[in-house]
Image (spheres, grey):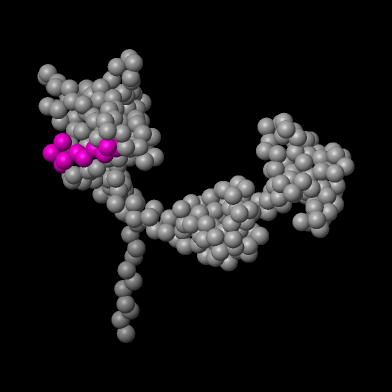
Amino acid sequence: MAKKAIAKKTEVAPQEKTIETIVKEAPVVKQPAKPSWEIKDRLYTLKNGMSPLVFTIASRHSARKPLLWFDESTGEQKELKYATNQNSPLVEEQKGQATLGRIVFRDGVLAVPKEKQNLQKLLSIYHPLKDKVYEEYNPVQESVNELDYINLEIEALMMARDLDIDQAEAIMRVEQGDKVDSLSSSELKRDLLIFAKRNPGLFIELANDENVELRNIGIKATSMGIIQLSSDQRTFTYGETKRKLMTVPFDEHPYSALAAYFKTDDGMEVYKNIMKRL
């Protein structure tokens, strides 16, 4: 019977890779996509609800009002200028005679049509006052902010609805002072709900502040003569005995200091006596 021929393995010397082979075998690194600039009409508004009839911001660099943009890729400061006949707000990219334009907000608003790309890019990308003095209107972000505010308002109104009358009085005393003493329970609840709706953030902060009720007790005790506050608002004393209770620390609100005092061992006894007399 004929034997099968066994194939011999032939060792081949490793071939040196050419530059073309190395380039082909190298993994492809995807470069991050640069954010695209959308050509559209844009709206800019002054921040913090400002709405003067006319408000002008710098449109060119000067020694008195610098208008520069820092280019992180080159580490250089670049001069800016809004020229109506140029395509770029960067002075180094402008050619020929430049016609200077003004940047004016009217009633707190500046609408820039898509045809003025140089002004849009100056305001949206380069101008140092962006997000400090003015901001670009973003309807998506505005809707998110509005939704957050509505949720905060709902939370505040629900908290206001469930507060007992003593807590309601303590919070409204911060807002209205001694006026709360003349309000009925229903009027107090009504004013509390209005306050929660108009300023939900502050309301929630006061509702969660454990010192608000203690301050309210201190104010009521003072108005009833149980304790007295000196004319310079530096010292609390017992109304009848004139015994000194505490000295108000410098630059601190007297009733905030009294609330903190009520939490001490000595102050706790005073607080208990006051509550009995109230």
Residue 248 drawn at (x, y percent):
75, 36
Quick one: which residue is furthest to the top in this view?
63
- 245 horizontally vs 248: left or right: right
Q: How many marks?
A: 0
Quarter occupied by residue 107: top left
Q: Nearer the viewer, residue 277 or 21?
A: 277
- 22 horizontally vs 102: left or right: right
Residue at 15% over, 31% down: 87
Q: Is residue 25 visible?
A: no
Residue at 27% over, 33% down: 53
Residue at 25% over, 25% down: 59
* Residue bounds of the magenta highlight: 107-116
Residue 229 drawn at (x, y percent):
75, 38
Label the magenta part by its dominant secondary structure: loop
Residue 115: say if magenta.
Answer: yes
Quarter occupied by residue 249: top right
Q: What quarter of the picture does the N terminus occupy?
A: bottom left
Q: Nearer the viewer, residue 33 or 231?
A: 231
Q: Is residue 162 above or below residue 217?
A: below
Q: Is residue 230 visible?
A: yes
Residue 6 drawn at (x, y percent):
34, 71
Residue 266: say if magenta.
Answer: no
Q: Is residue 268 above or below residue 234?
A: below
Q: Nearer the viewer, residue 274 or 36?
A: 274
